[in-house]
Amino acid sequence: MTYFFLQAEDHMFWAHCPWYWLWTLGAFLLGSLLTWLLTRRGDTEVVDNTQIIADRDRYKGAATKWETDYNSLKYQLEESQKAEADLRAGLASCNADKAILEQEVINTKASAAAAFAAGTGAGAAGNAALSGIAGAGNDRVAGDDATIIPAADLSGDAGGSVYDGLFAVDNFQIIEGVGPKVNEVLKANGYNEWADLAKADADDLRKMLQGAGKNFGLTDPTSWPHQAGLAAAGDWDELIKYQKFTDAGRETVGDFETPSKFEKLAAKELGFSSNNPNDLKVVEGIGPKIEGLLKADGINTWSDLAAADQSRLQGILDAAGSRYKMAIPRTWPQQAALAAAGDWKALKALQDDLQGGL
């Protein structure tokens, strides 16, 4: 018991020791200081977060304003492009009407010239002028006002007026069965123009080819004089028809389905990549993708396109999506009609005034 009380007294003694209180006070102050520091740091972080949120809202507002301005400018650009497309379409329509009127004037003059030749018997000089059938470069008199117009503009035959003067008279490659090497062989043997070849005998031509080398042994010149005669006479439609009948110039195997070599070369000469009626890309404004859209809707040939309503064509483009909204098919049927008719010169004149089909 005595030891227990001594221990208790000893414990109470240290309780009244100044160091005990100093350590206790120091621990309290240290805890308070740490609490203050931690609380102050939290307040700072709250302030920083508030500033970040404020900056974010400010940037978001600026971005929203920029997006609004962009959409406004985009809308103005689209409206300007639509206005430009309408203006181009109007210009193309005017040019198309102009081409039609010019063709009507030419046809009227030709009719007047024919009527004058048939109904007047106007004397030797007038007859000689109107008969200027001798020579493609001669001018003829048309109508009572004695207006002189070029012979090339006075063709009642649409085929002649289209293809006249496209090829030199010594270009034998327009003849089915004649290539560049055979062309040179013909010239080397005195055939200088279509009229010379038209007078040739097929057997003589065959002997000439045999003498030129074994590479020409299988060439059949039977139809060449006839083709050359049609070319010399400027009977282009008949030449095209005849070449479609033959197969590489061989009369006995024709089926009227073989493409015409002359027509193909003439189309190329006039700046067209193809004379295939299924090639819708010949029409200005139609590319491979739009061609695919049209064919998927049953428009496969120039004739199909010429017969299609503009509303139908526009519907095809609209259904294909916004990427085709700038394509305007206003002149496509007219261009296709000219291509289907083989009126390459008129089509070229029309396309020279167009831009993207407008």
Image (cartoon, grey):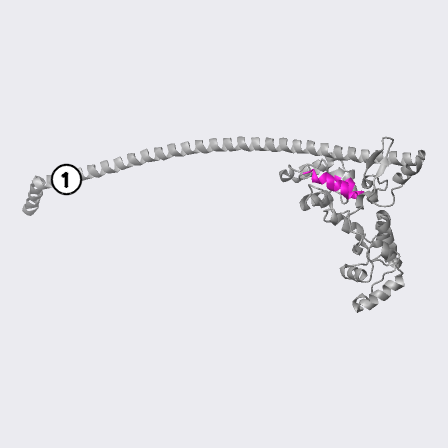
**353 in magenta:** yes
Q: Residue 32 appears at what percent x and percent y?
A: 20, 36
Q: Residues within 10 Å of mark 1 (few under 14, many from 20)?
A: few
For the C terminus, the image quarter is top right
Q: Is residue 161 visible?
A: yes
Circle 1 residue: 26
Q: Which quarter of the figure has residue 119?
A: top right
Viewer-side residue, 248 vs 25: 248
Q: Does 148 sit left or right of 44 as displayed?
A: right
- Magenta span: predominant SS is helix
Give SS at disc 1. Answer: helix
**118 in magenta:** no
| Mark 1: amino acid | Gly
Viewer-side residue, 115 vs 224: 115
Read off the magenta span.
335-354
Q: Residue 327 appears at what percent x and percent y?
A: 66, 38
Q: Residue 14 appears at what percent x and percent y?
A: 8, 42
Q: Which quarter of the figure has residue 184?
A: bottom right
